[in-house]
Image: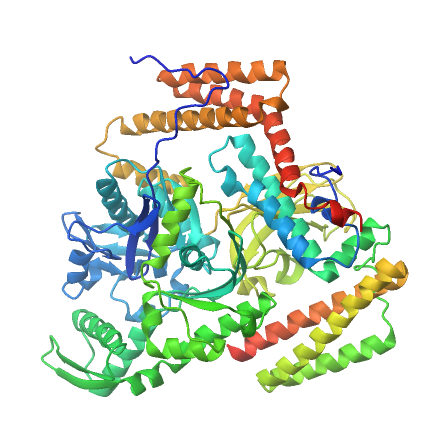
């Protein structure tokens, strides 16, 4: 059997027995997550010793964090780039292409208008448009990292994705405000 | 004294006895208790064969307390001392409670949770709820013929930390060992999922007497994974009653009502609502204490009309939960209806319309939560049977964060994160030479601290004086599998640390609980001592069993020396258990725990390896 380092400090990909790649088989990830969690979760150690229970909690926490990171393509990309020594520096680097910014501004205006008009349908339209853009960017990110190995461009794209995901949250907040 | 039995090292201990564990649905209107009997989840009835216990507590001048149907019957006679829907007050301040002016109780002004002045003294919602839980515990122990090992108690998924803590305190006060606080819709999903071998995405729509929850779950190969949850912890059947009540007053143009008449009309309003689930219209005829007559007819259409905005209030959180889960209604395989209030036709219609499918009503909406809780209790108590290999992964309902400069909230753990979870975030000082930092922990979705609920405030002192922005304070939030939070702050350059178990501002302090417990044991002499000793003995027995079973499975992970060490610590504990010295037992337990620490770590590593064995080889060669 292939052995690999499955200790607590292993990286998220290794932990789930996956290759370090942006393209990822969601079902394998889900299955590994459930298989490991079924063994380490505190509920499975409810009658074990205190040491066991504490470890179970640490492991379950670790597995949850790893799963949340890998499940979202944006967070996965950011994490993978860090692993590969190309930290996208989300906090410090805010340079964006003009074209991207203009598009974002248009979307933001559309959200504002729909929100003040309490127009749920219009918000849904913007949401779907943004979701499609994000989805296309996810695919581009996978080919930039896995195929082209163009990590600089990939880091730029990850920064843009953080913007888009934030806007998605704002649309969700607006939808909540409008439907409440 | 009986001789102690010591098992041969490595040999298995006697087979586990069946531990008595129950699930308790502590509802706004009614409460239930259930257990697993011969592999089947069943609700335990009272001696008259009734499954429900009305969540009503009546206090009398002589200090006696009545709970359930008897108390319910007294509510129009003595509304001030007959507490209904106490769940609405749990972990809540005065300003949190809707329609407080229409309630017949004497509220006492306090800083934290509201308190009620009754003829038997001032009572907190925790004490009142404890009376209901005590009744449930007595029913269970009488019916099962023994003392309970523990209970799973359900709470609305959308309950915040203060409300959860209050529930746990109430259980403690009722002498119940809480195995887990379980979210009500999740409990229902367990009961439904195991009953129907369901796979796929399910929504649980839970409208109770006072609370509304919506949870979206993925059921797959024995794993119940909550993907998102939402709701309103102050919306339920009570609000529909209130609309009918207001409509009656408006239509009948009554003179200002006495407390008794108000309670009478509220009861009639509820009865009318319930009858409308089966009939197109109902007559409401009442003779009031004032001599006035009320003679009205409420139709389904009118009821629908006056409750339209309430129905709408369930739809918005449902849509939000779907968005949070990243799903659309088309992904949802079935909608499980839970809670007596889902019997209302307008709710059934609204849900069917939103999800574009008929909701699932094949389980008794009033029993399903208790049945699911019983299943989980059975598992956590250690009565796992062969087919019970399922796992529950739940989430936190509300985001957790910290106050930063300007009263803004920095979210540290977002809502709908799977628990247990830990997150760390770094902060820095605002002023030159700042040596202390006040850390305020909040819960909620809004950007301003003032719009969120404050859970705790603590201080980190001893930060070395530096220029503003130079210190690195790492704040770590850890939420355990019970959904309870602890927070640590650590200054990175000096390693100075402050830690706090979050006790919500509206919870009871340990002293208050101890005081209440003392009151309830005041006639019991050295009961408290006996109880503590017995608890320690039970704990010790548990630790020995756990260690023996670990040794049986994985003794090969230990060297001869390590093994001898553990065996010795185990023998010591077994001796200590036979005596009456609680401190000695605690000490021996501590030694055994320490001796098995490294063993536990190795076992867990091996277990994770095994989980993935044979499945990843192909993926690794990608």
Q: Is residue B571 left or right of residue B70?
A: right
Which quadrant holds residue B608? top right
Q: Point out residue B95 in the picture as x, y percentages from the top left corner.
A: 41, 65
Q: Is residue B563 left or right of residue B362?
A: right
Quadrant of the rendering where the N terminus of chain B is positioned: top left
Q: Is residue B264 left or right of residue B26?
A: left
Could one spot residue B109 in this view of the protein? no
Vertical comparison of B450 with B413: above or below: below
Could one spot residue B314 in this view of the protein? yes
> At 60% across and 26% down in the image, what residue appears?
B599
> At 35% across and 53% down in the image, what residue appears?
B371
> At 68% across and 37% down in the image, what residue appears?
B496
Q: Point out residue B185 in the picture as x, y percentages from the top left corner.
A: 43, 60
Give the total of numbered labels: 0
Query: Nearest the camera: B332 or A66?
Result: B332
Q: Is residue B345 left or right of residue A15?
A: left
Q: How is the image coloured?
A: rainbow
> At 60% across and 56% down in the image, what residue appears?
B401
- Seen as rendered, the residue at the extreme left is B291
Query: Nearest the camera: A97 or B9?
Result: B9
Vertical comparison of A111 with B428: above or below: below
Q: Point out residue A80 in the picture as x, y percentages from the top left corner.
A: 79, 53
Vertical comparison of B603 with A177: above or below: above
Q: Point out residue A168 in the picture as x, y percentages from the top left corner.
A: 67, 71
């Amino acid at each position: 059997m292939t052995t690999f380092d499955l200790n607590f400090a292993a990286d998220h990909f290794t932990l789930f027995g996956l290759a370090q790649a942006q393209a990822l088989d969601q079902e394998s990830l889900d299955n590994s997550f459930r298989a490991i969690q079924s063994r380490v979760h505190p509920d499975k150690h409810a009658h074990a010793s205190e040491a066991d229970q504490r470890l179970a909690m640490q492991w379950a926490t670790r597995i949850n964090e790893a799963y949340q990171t890998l499940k979202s393509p944006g967070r996965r990309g950011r994490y993978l780039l860090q692993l590969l020594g190309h930290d996208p520096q989300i906090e410090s680097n805010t340079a964006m292409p003009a074209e991207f910014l203009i598009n974002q501004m248009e979307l933001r205006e559309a959200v504002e208008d729909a929100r003040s008009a309490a127009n749920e349908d219009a918000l849904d339209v913007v949401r779907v448009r943004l979701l499609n853009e994000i989805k296309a960017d996810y695919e581009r990110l996978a080919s930039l990292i896995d195929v082209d190995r163009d990590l600089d461009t990939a880091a730029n794209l990850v920064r843009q994705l953080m913007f888009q995901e934030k806007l998605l949250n704002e649309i969700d907040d607006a939808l909540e405000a409008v439907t409440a | 004294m009986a001789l102690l039995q010591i098992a041969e090292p490595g040999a298995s201990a006697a087979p586990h006895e069946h531990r008595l564990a129950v699930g308790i649905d502590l509802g706004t209107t009614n409460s239930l208790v259930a257990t697993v009997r011969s592999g089947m989840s069943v609700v335990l009835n009272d001696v008259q064969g009734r499954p429900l216990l009305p969540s009503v507590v009546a206090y009398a001048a002589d200090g006696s307390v009545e709970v359930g149907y008897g108390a319910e019957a007294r509510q129009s006679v003595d509304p001030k001392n007959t507490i209904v829907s106490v769940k609405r007050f749990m972990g809540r301040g005065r300003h949190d409670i809707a329609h407080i002016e229409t309630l017949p109780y004497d509220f006492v002004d306090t800083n934290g949770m509201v308190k009620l002045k009754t003829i038997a003294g001032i009572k907190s919602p925790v004490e009142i709820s404890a009376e209901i839980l005590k009744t449930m515990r007595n029913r269970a122990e009488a019916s099962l013929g023994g003392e309970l090992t523990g209970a799973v108690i359900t709470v609305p998924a959308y309950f915040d930390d203060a409300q959860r803590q209050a529930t746990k305190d109430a259980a403690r006060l009722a002498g119940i060992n809480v195995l887990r606080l379980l979210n009500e819709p999740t409990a229902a999903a367990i009961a439904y999922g195991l009953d129907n071998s369901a796979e796929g995405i399910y929504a649980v729509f839970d409208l109770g007497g006072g609370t509304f929850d919506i949870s979206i779950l993925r059921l797959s190969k024995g794993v119940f994974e909550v993907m998102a949850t939402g709701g309103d912890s102050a919306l339920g059947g009570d609000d529909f009653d209130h609309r009918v009540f207001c409509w009656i007053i408006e239509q009948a143009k009554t003179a200002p009502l006495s407390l008794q008449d108000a309670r009478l009309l509220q009861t009639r309003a509820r009865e009318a609502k319930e009858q409308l689930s089966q009939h197109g219209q109902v007559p409401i005829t009442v003779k009031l204490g004032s001599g006035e007559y009320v003679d009205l007819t409420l139709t389904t259409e009118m009821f629908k009309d006056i409750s339209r905005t309430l129905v709408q209030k369930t739809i918005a959180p449902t849509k939000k939960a779907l968005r949070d889960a990243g799903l659309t209604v088309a992904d949802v395989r079935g909608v499980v209806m839970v809670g007596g209030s889902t019997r209302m036709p307008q709710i059934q219609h609204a849900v069917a319309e939103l999800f574009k499918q008929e909701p699932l009503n094949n389980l008794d909406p009033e029993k399903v939560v208790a049945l699911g809780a019983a299943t989980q209790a059975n598992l956590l108590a250690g009565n796992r049977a062969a087919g019970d290999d399922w796992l529950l992964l739940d989430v936190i309902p509300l985001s957790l964060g910290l106050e930063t400069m300007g009263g803004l909230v920095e979210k540290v753990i977002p809502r709908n994160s799977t628990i247990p979870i830990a997150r760390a975030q770094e902060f820095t000082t605002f002023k030159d030479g700042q040596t202390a930092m006040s850390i305020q922990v909040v819960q909620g979705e809004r950007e301003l601290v003032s719009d969120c609920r404050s859970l705790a405030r603590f201080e980190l002192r001893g930060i070395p004086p530096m220029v503003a922005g130079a210190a690195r304070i790492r704040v770590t939030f850890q939420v355990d599998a019970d959904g309870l939070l602890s927070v640590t702050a650590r200054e990175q350059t000096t390693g100075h640390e402050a830690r706090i178990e979050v006790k919500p501002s509206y919870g009871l302090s340990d002293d208050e609980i101890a005081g209440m417990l003392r009151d309830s044991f005041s006639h019991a002499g050295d009961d408290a001592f006996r109880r503590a000793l017995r608890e320690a003995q039970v704990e010790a027995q548990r630790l020995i069993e756990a260690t023996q079973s670990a040794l049986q499975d994985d003794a090969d992970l230990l060297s001869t020396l390590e093994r001898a060490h553990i065996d010795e610590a185990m023998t010591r504990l077994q001796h200590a258990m036979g005596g009456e010295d609680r401190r000695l037992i605690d000490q021996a337990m501590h030694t055994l725990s320490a001796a098995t620490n490294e063993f536990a770590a190795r076992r867990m590593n091996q277990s994770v390896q095994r989980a993935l064995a044979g499945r990843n080889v192909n993926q690794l060669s990608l």
